[in-house]
Amino acid sequence: MPLKIIRDDITKVPVDAIVNAANKTLLGGSGVDGAIHRAAGPALLEECRRLGGCPTGQAKITQGYNLPATYVIHTVGPIWQGGNSDEAEQLASCYQNSLQLAKTYDLKSMAFPLISAGAYGYPKEQALEIAISTINAFLQQNPLLVYLVLFTEEDLILSHQWLKP
Ligand code: AR6
């Protein structure tokens, strides 16, 4: 099944797992991370404290608590530094490791935000390209319903332009 690109608030999406664009501490932050912690409630932070952080490009799973999603997969995107510091490989690893975790947990559906494309400054077109190509490569081998959830109309339009042949 091909990737579905939608505009929504990821905290409202009823899937088996939503992915959080976290930082290495896994202790919360602004952007989508803040929104997920607010919607999930304080028990999420309690569980995150026990995880001991997460390296860039890796992913860890928790319960979803008050979210409609059953689980949250926390991944840490790279901070954009101009493009010559392995940012593309690290960003692709975020998607791959999150998808792999979903497979390990036998999940049927999951939703990603556009990792690194906010506070971490990754250029949106390039972030979109990596998200779409990495997820679609995985979906050629694995049955899973995957949403890429964009937060603004502008990002959705950008994704349509990018998807044009
Ligand atoms: N639903 C879907 N997408 C959202 C939502 C939402 N509710 N809120 C924001 N976005 P960012 P990063 C989009 O900054 O760049 C945090 O402080 C947003 O428009 O959330 O990976 C962490 O703790 C953008 O396209 O994540 C880290 O310190 C995308 O989510 C740092 O920010 C990612 O923006 C991570 O930065």
Image: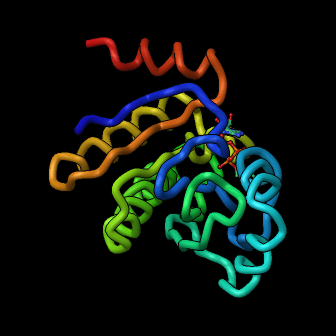
- Location of residue 118 in the rendering, given as x and y in whole percent from the top left corner: 69, 39
How many numbered marks are there? Answer: 0
Classify 90 as above or below 59: above
- Name the residue at 77% across, 45% down: 31
Classify 121 as above or below 74: above
- Name the residue at 61% across, 75% down: 54
46 displayed left or right of 138: right
Image quarter of residue 12 = top right
- Location of residue 101 in the rendering, given as x and y in whole percent from the top left corner: 40, 69
The quarter of the rendered structure image containing the N terminus is: top left
84 displayed left or right of 64: left
Figure coloring: rainbow
Q: Of residues 77 and 1, which is closer to you in this image?
A: 1
Q: Of residues 139 and 129, which is closer to you in this image?
A: 139
- Location of residue 127 in the rendering, given as x and y in whole percent from the top left corner: 50, 37
- Name the residue at 33% across, 36% down: 3
- Location of residue 85 in the rendering, given as x and y in whole percent from the top left corner: 53, 55
The quarter of the picture showing ligand 1? top right
- Name the residue at 37% across, 62% down: 107
The quarter of the rendered structure image containing the C terminus is: top left
Image quarter of residue 43 = bottom right
